[in-house]
């Protein structure tokens, strides 16, 4: 899909944020969507509509409970929590939708019912009211074509839990006005979501992956247990298909959506019969078990894969409530090697087949598909990344085997390497001759890793000598974070290995060193927090603009490590007069507001809104055109460092490690005195490696990964 702007903040604002929203359907997802909207849009008036008073009662309780929880966990301020509880109504009367500027339907997946609902909504609401459906499968044209004003209608498909899962598919269908689709993209973006535009095909983009993945798991039950399948799938996803089906009562969904796919696109999408049997568990009990001794050589694939269970001797498939008998994510179960191989080939087969089909039919973008699979379904990596890692030959083998066994299932229309040509972790845009690079890893607040920095570097190199390009802006996706630092998930494997740590720091620094001598101006546009490695990237850019609620921090010492890629060097060599403030940031993790950074000359311009930010950045690119800025290549004299402490504390009162405090203190001092920038940077890499060898680093990083507070006592 080609879009005019990849980063939705570049879309020209049209229309205000909605003030009154109606949600039809008080099941689970309806109230969850309501909570997202209430917590994201201050003062929003929300009305929930359902035919069941009980369901409405439960939905209201749910919203109040979310507000309590959000407050208790510090995710909501008391004002925000109060805002969720206020202006909240529930009704069985559709007339209460009057005055809504957005109605979202989240009712039963029934085309005729939904069409009637939309006709009614159109009669009650105004001409400009946005009308959207949360269907996971029914194409928009089947739902909205009959309306008088279909141009303000479409599917906005959320993923569970809708208040936390950021993905929303926005279906770009024939009769929807392009400006309406753009408005939705922008609206979702500024309220914290990750909108993904898809074409109007059955199941849109992401559920084509998920439903067929689950359906294939159903067919695999001819030769393996749910637990064996979930265990094998665990190499690729955090929770296997049967575990997820149990959590989401998903059996009927697979039947509905795959039946629809089969009707619209061919019988190869037919749902496995076993799902209906699981639903009918009360009447039919367990299916007939045919004893097959040779589990090592299961009869799966080929002609057996029609879902008629030829079930191996492996006990029951589901319990008395119809839940699949499976394991929890991370639990173990024995799976014979040949069974593992077959499950793997079939699951990857359907995954790759859907992937190439989605891209060949331009149903969505490769970048959205990758990110969507990670965010919406907790795939450990996107399917294209997986294909790249497995290599072309192995991926071809899997695809060929799958499409042979499942006639009709799509195969690749191009050589497999041709599907790999896209940016995975950044978005690239162009405005007024400036390339805008957006860091996009919303699942980790845009934390940086070398694949992401390599993409940035490649883009800089590609356009540095392009006469049409005046310069670059680097910004973060969303309204919360520029970047929350280096990806902490990559640290545990290197802790304690000095050479590997130094090597890591040098590799991570390639982009930063390049920026030092880049011939075109590069401006960091801080759309939110810039922490650790993210701040190290920002201060290496030649200029900084920031929204006024952004903030800067080096939290590394709270993780038991030193900032390795210039954090102890560059601030002092660029803004030596602010040295005392940097001491506090590096040795006590003090936060610096964008306003303070502006006062100290670190931030060039404060922007009042996210809209203004990139335009201010573009102006700064123009101002910097003839001026090169970067860290000094000579020693700097800096304010005296605070004395060493045995029991240092962070600005927030957290006990820190004395050993790491000493490493950072020494490195700041040595680097300031170093004869050249290169020498100073090398000292920084070495200090990072030294800190990473401490017991404090092990404790700090483990604590982050385990989501607990670190205990640096005695470290
Ligand atoms: N590396 C990897 N993942 C990171 C990350 C980083 N630097 N920063 C945040 N994330 C992940 C979190 O693990 C979390 O993932 P999960 O949803 O799978 O659990 C997700 O991003 C959201 O972060 P969360 O901590 O839930 O958000 P929050 O709003 O409660 O807190 C921060 C935000 C920034 C305060 C907190 O994420 C944090 O302290 N991050 C580490 C910052 C840091 O030390 N950076 C320097 C690294 S060198």
Image (cartoon, grey):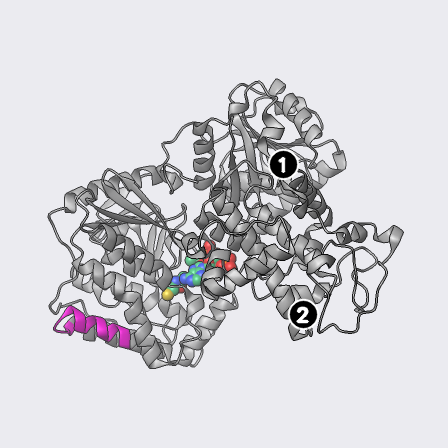
Give the Cα separation between the discs numbered 2 and 1: 35 Å
Q: Where is residue 100 in the image (x, y as percent from the top left)?
A: 56, 25
Quadrant containing the C terminus is bottom left
Q: Which residue is drawn at 56% across and 53% down?
A: 353
36 vs 220, nearest the viewer: 220
Residue 649 in view of the camera: yes
Q: In which quarter of the image is ligand 1?
A: bottom left
594 vs 375, nearest the viewer: 375
Q: Which residue is drawn at 18% across and 60% down?
A: 516
Q: Where is residue 443 in the image (x, y as percent from the top left)?
A: 47, 55
714 vs 210, nearest the viewer: 210
Quadrant containing the N terminus is top left
Q: Where is residue 690 in the image (x, y as percent from the top left)?
A: 32, 79
Q: Callout 1: 10 Å neighbours few (<14), some, many (20+)?
A: many
**Label ID, residue 339:** 2
Residue 330 in view of the camera: no
Q: Is mark 1 on a helix, strand or loop?
A: loop
Q: In this view, does 646 lie to the left or right of 158?
A: left
Q: In this view, does 56 lie to the left or right of 380?
A: right
Q: Is mark 2 on a helix, strand or loop?
A: helix
Say which of marks 2 and 1 sits in front. 2
| Region of the chain picked out in magenta, as a range | 673-686
Please report contact status of discs 2 and 1: CB closer than 8 Å, yes or no.
Answer: no
Quadrant in which residue 204 is drawn:
top right
Q: Which residue is drawn at 67% across and 70% down?
A: 339
Q: Is residue 681 magenta?
A: yes
Q: In this view, does 119 lie to the left or right of 81?
A: right
Q: Is residue 619 left or right of residue 327?
A: left
The residue that mark 1 highlights is 138
515 vs 655, nearest the viewer: 515
Is the CB of the residue bearing disc 2 within 8 angstroms of ligand 1?
no
């Amino acid at each position: 899909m080609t879009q005019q702007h990849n980063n939705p903040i570049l879309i020209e604002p049209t229309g205000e944020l909605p003030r009154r929203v109606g949600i039809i359907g008080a099941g689970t997802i309806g109230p969850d969507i309501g909570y997202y909207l209430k917590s994201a849009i201050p003062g929003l008036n929300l009305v929930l509509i359902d035919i069941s008073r009980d369901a409405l009662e439960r939905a209201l309780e749910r919203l109040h409970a979310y507000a309590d929880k959000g407050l208790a966990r510090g995710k909501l301020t008391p004002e925000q929590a109060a805002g969720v509880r206020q202006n909240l109504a529930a009704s069985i009367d559709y007339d209460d939708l009057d005055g809504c500027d957005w109605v979202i339907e989240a009712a039963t997946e029934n085309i005729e019912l939904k069409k009637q609902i939309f006709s009614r909504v159109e009669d009650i609401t105004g001409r400009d009211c946005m009308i959207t459906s949360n269907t996971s499968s029914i194409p928009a044209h089947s739902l909205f074509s009959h309306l008088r004003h279909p141009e303000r209608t479409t599917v906005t498909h959320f993923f569970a839990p809708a208040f936390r899962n950021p993905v929303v598919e926005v279906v770009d269908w024939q009769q929807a006005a392009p400006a309406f689709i753009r408005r939705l993209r922008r609206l979702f973006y500024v309220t914290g979501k990750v909108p993904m535009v898809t074409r109007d095909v059955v199941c849109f983009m992401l559920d084509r992956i998920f439903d067929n993945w689950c359906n294939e798991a159903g067919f695999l039950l001819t030769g393996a247990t749910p637990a064996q399948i979930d265990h094998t799938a665990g190499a690729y996803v955090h929770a296997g298909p049967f575990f997820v089906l149990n959590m989401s009562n998903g059996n009927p969904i697979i039947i509905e959506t795959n039946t629809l796919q089969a009707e619209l696109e061919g019988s190869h999408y037919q749902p496995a019969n076993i799902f209906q049997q699981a639903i009918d568990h009360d009447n039919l009990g367990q299916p007939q078990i045919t004893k097959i001794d040779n589990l090592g050589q299961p009869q799966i694939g080929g002609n057996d894969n029609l879902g008629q269970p030829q079930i191996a001797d492996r006990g029951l498939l589901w319990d008395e409530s119809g839940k699949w008998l499976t394991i929890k994510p991370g639990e173990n179960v024995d799976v014979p090697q040949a069974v593992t191989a077959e499950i793997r080939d079939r699951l990857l087969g359907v995954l790759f087949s859907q992937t190439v089909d989605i891209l060949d039919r331009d149903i969505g973008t490769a970048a959205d598909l990758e990110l969507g699979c990670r965010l919406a379904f907790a795939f450990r990596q996107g399917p294209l990344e997986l294909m790249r890692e497995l290599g072309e030959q192995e991926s071809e083998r899997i695809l060929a085997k799958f499409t042979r066994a499942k006639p009709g299932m799509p195969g690749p229309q191009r050589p497999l390497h041709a599907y790999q040509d896209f940016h995975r972790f950044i978005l690239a845009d162009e405005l007024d001759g400036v390339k805008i690079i957006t860091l996009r890893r919303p699942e980790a607040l845009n934390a940086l890793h070398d694949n992401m920095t390599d993409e940035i570097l490649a883009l800089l190199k590609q356009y540095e000598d392009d006469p049409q390009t005046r310069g670059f802006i680097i910004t973060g996706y969303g309204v919360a974070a520029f970047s929350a630092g280096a990806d902490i998930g990559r640290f545990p494997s290197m802790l304690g290995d000095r050479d590997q740590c130094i090597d890591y720091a040098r590799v991570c620094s390639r982009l930063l060193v390049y920026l030092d001598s880049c011939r075109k101006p590069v401006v960091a546009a801080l759309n939110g927090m810039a922490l650790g490695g993210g701040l190290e990237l920002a201060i290496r850019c030649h200029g900084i603009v920031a929204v006024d609620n952004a903030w800067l921090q080096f939290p590394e010492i709270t993780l038991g490590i030193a900032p390795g890629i210039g954090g102890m060097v560059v601030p002092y060599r660029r803004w030596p007069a602010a040295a005392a403030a940097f001491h506090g940031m590096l040795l006590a993790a003090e936060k610096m507001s964008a306003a303070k950074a502006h006062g100290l000359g670190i931030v060039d311009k404060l922007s009042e809104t996210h809209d203004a930010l990139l335009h201010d950045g573009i102006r700064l690119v123009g101002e910097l055109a003839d001026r090169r800025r970067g860290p000094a290549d000579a020693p700097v004299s800096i304010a005296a460092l605070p004395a060493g402490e045995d029991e240092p504390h962070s600005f927030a009162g957290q006990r820190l490690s004395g050993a790491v405090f000493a490493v950072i203190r020494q490195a700041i001092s040595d680097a300031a005195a170093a004869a050249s920038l290169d020498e100073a940077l090398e000292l920084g890499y070495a200090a990072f490696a030294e800190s990473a060898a401490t017991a404090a680093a092990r404790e700090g990083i483990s604590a982050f990964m385990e989501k607990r507070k670190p205990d640096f006592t005695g470290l």
